């Protein structure tokens, strides 16, 4: 008879364990929240790293004149040295 009872308990264990675990977790959550109290309000939302990087770049270029750029004709190093080194005339 005991083998039949244990077989029934084993087959129905998930149906019993889940609700018990859910109730224990819910009670534990509320007890822990009552002991700790309400969380402090967030002082200021921190900006993401991407936003901080964009702001830093904007501050760096704020004082520069963006219309003055080097011409591609004057700039000889537009490609990696290993690619076009043998066909390029040497700088004097």
Image (tube, rainbow, N blue to C red):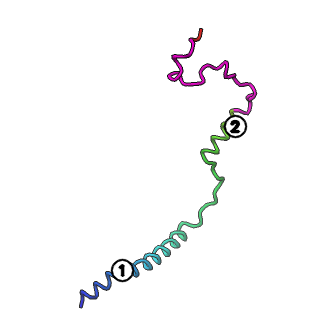
* Residue 62, numbered label: none
Chain-order first, disc 1 or disc 2: 1
Residue under the image location 51 percent in, 71 percent down: 29
- Left or right: residue 84 versus residue 41 is left
* Residue 13, numbered label: 1
The magenta segment = 61-89
Where 52 falls versus 24 (above or below)?
A: above
Where 24 falls versus 75 (above or below)?
A: below
In the rendering, at what x and y percent does residue 41 appear?
Answer: 64, 60
Q: Is residue 70 magenta?
A: yes
Residue under the image location 65 percent in, 53 percent down: 45
Where 90 falls versus 75 (above or below)?
A: above
Q: Quadrant of residue 17?
A: bottom left
Closer-to-camera residue (57/28)? 57
Assign the magenta stretch its main secondary structure: loop
In the rendering, at what x and y percent does residue 35 appear?
Answer: 53, 69
Circle 1 sits in a helix, a strand or a loop, which is it?
helix
| Figure quadrant of the N terminus | bottom left
- Left or right: residue 76 versus residue 27 is right
In the rendering, at what x and y percent does residue 75 appear?
Answer: 64, 20
Residue under the image location 71 percent in, 25 percent down: 69
Circle 2 sits in a helix, a strand or a loop, which is it?
helix
Q: Is residue 51 magenta?
A: no
Residue under the image location 59 percent in, 66 percent down: 38
Farthest bottom residue? 1
Classify mark 2: residues with Cα within 10 Å, few (<14), some (14-19) or many (20+).
few
Where 11 falls versus 84 (above or below)?
A: below
Q: In the rendered image, which residue does mark 2 sit on?
A: 58
């Amino acid at each position: 008879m005991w083998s039949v009872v244990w077989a029934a308990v084993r087959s129905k264990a998930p149906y019993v364990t889940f609700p018990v675990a859910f109730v224990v977790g819910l009670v534990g959550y509320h007890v822990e929240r009552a002991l700790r109290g309400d969380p402090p309000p967030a002082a200021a939302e921190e900006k993401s790293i991407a936003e901080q990087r964009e702001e830093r770049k904007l501050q760096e270029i704020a004082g520069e004149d963006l219309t003055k750029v080097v011409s591609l004709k004057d700039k000889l190093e537009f490609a990696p040295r290993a690619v076009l080194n043998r066909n390029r005339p040497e700088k004097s």
